[in-house]
Image (tube, helix red, strand yellow):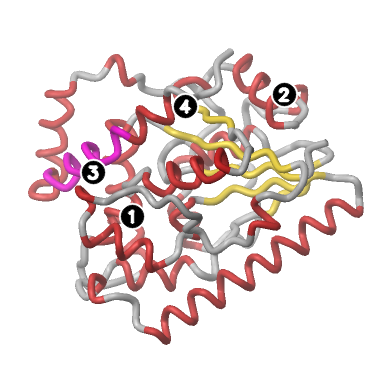
């Protein structure tokens, strides 16, 4: 019996569109905006030029305490759902919950980084491996999501007033290392997560229903269309989160998007040069770093 569905993703992979598609399950409690207390603390550190000096102990203690409080809230929500014979649905980005020590280790040498073999997230095993858990990971081709992630991160830093121009945050947001490590950790514990690519679920009703069947949700209760701005998951959605999810709030359904196979890579890079200027080199580097992990996860994606 499924007790909780855990959705892990990187930003700009159409993950919030999929979350909305799955948002009206009648026997499911939605744990919305998980880890919103700890995210700004991490973002402030990651967007400073001094980031590579390490997170100062006071900020680190504050960050870890915030994560711990949110894990306690997660446990409370899970217990409350169980008491009503319901399941819990939670969506988060793995780098939000990865230890800052692991993040710093990666940032010091992204190209030479070795995947960790032990769990690097701060969430207790009792939550991640709770009996009846169904984890799944959302991916998208790096040529499609990384430029969008860089664009959105720049907007969010300005919107939230974070940092002093440091670039480390882009390497965290634009890395699939966190998903790959958590995916491998689950497998090492005998739990095989589903992997879904945005190209498979966008605009494909049959695939979405197939996913529901695999992760313990009701295929008959998917939401395939909605009115623009008709609702949000939470009327008190933080302003920064509204900025992050602007595309979702402006959408009206899970429509098919661009396909990686249709992209002219050279033409795409010319567009990056025009849009990002000197930072186009950063976009290229992030794409190159992400590709091996994307290809690894893609080979294990859920098929019809």
Is 262 contained in the magenta span?
Answer: no
Of helix, strand and loop, which one carries label 1? Answer: helix
Q: CA distance from mark 1 to mark 4?
A: 20 Å
Q: CA distance from mark 2 to mark 4?
A: 16 Å
Q: Quadrant of residue 103?
A: bottom left
Q: Which mark is residue 213?
A: 2
Of helix, strand and loop, which one carries label 2? Answer: helix
Residue beneath disc 1: 172
Q: Which residues are magenta?
A: 281-292
Q: Quadrant of residue 77?
A: bottom right
Q: Residue shown at 52%/28% (left/top)?
A: 196
Residue 57 spot, x, y in % from top left: 39, 84
Q: Residue shown at 56%/74% (left/top)?
A: 66
Q: Which mark is residue 286?
A: 3
Q: Mark 4 or mark 3, which is nearer the start of the sequence?
A: 4
Q: Is residue 199 left or right of residue 1?
A: left
Residue beneath disc 4: 197
Q: CA distance from mark 2 to mark 1?
A: 32 Å
Q: How dense is the environment of label 4, judged by Cα within 10 Å: few (below 14), some, or many (20 and up)?
A: many
Q: How dense is the environment of label 1, judged by Cα within 10 Å: few (below 14), some, or many (20 and up)?
A: many
Q: CA distance from mark 3 to mark 4?
A: 19 Å
Residue 264 against residue 42 in the figure, above or below: above
Q: How dense is the environment of label 3, judged by Cα within 10 Å: few (below 14), some, or many (20 and up)?
A: many
Of helix, strand and loop, which one carries label 3? Answer: helix
Q: Mark 1 or mark 2, which is nearer the start of the sequence?
A: 1
Q: Is residue 157 left or right of residue 181?
A: left
Q: Residue shown at 77%/55% (left/top)?
A: 78
Of helix, strand and loop, which one carries label 4? Answer: strand
Residue 217 against residue 89 in the figure, above or below: above
Q: How dense is the environment of label 2, judged by Cα within 10 Å: few (below 14), some, or many (20 and up)?
A: few
């Amino acid at each position: 019996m499924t007790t909780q569905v855990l959705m892990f993703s990187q930003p700009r992979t159409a993950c919030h569109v999929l979350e909305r598609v799955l948002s009206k399950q009648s026997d499911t409690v939605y744990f919305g905006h998980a880890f919103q207390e700890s995210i700004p603390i991490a973002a402030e550190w990651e967007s400073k030029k001094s980031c590579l000096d390490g997170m100062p102990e006071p900020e680190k203690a504050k960050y870890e305490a915030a994560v711990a409080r949110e894990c306690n809230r997660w446990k409370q929500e899970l217990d409350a759902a169980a008491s009503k014979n319901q399941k819990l649905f939670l969506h988060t980005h793995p780098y939000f919950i990865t230890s800052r020590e692991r993040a710093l280790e990666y940032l010091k040498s992204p190209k030479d980084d070795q995947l960790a073999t032990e769990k690097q997230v701060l969430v207790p095993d009792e939550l991640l491996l709770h009996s009846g858990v169904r984890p799944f990971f959302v991916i998208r081709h790096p040529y499609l999501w990384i430029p969008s992630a860089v664009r959105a991160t720049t907007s969010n830093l300005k919107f939230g007033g974070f940092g002093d121009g440091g670039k480390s945050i882009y390497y965290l947001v634009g890395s699939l290392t966190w998903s790959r490590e958590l995916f491998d950790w689950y497998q090492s514990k005998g739990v095989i997560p589903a992997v879904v690519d945005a190209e498979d679920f966008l605009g494909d009703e049959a695939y979405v229903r197939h996913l529901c069947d695999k992760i313990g949700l009701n295929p008959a209760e998917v939401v395939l269309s909605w009115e623009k701005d008709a609702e949000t998951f939470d009327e008190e959605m933080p302003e920064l989160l509204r900025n992050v999810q602007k595309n979702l709030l402006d959408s009206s359904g899970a429509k098919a998007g661009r396909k990686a196979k249709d992209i002219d890579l050279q033409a795409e890079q010319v567009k990056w040069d025009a849009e990002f200027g000197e930072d186009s080199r950063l976009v290229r580097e992030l794409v190159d770093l992400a590709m091996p992990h994307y290809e690894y996860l893609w080979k294990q994606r859920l098929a019809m």
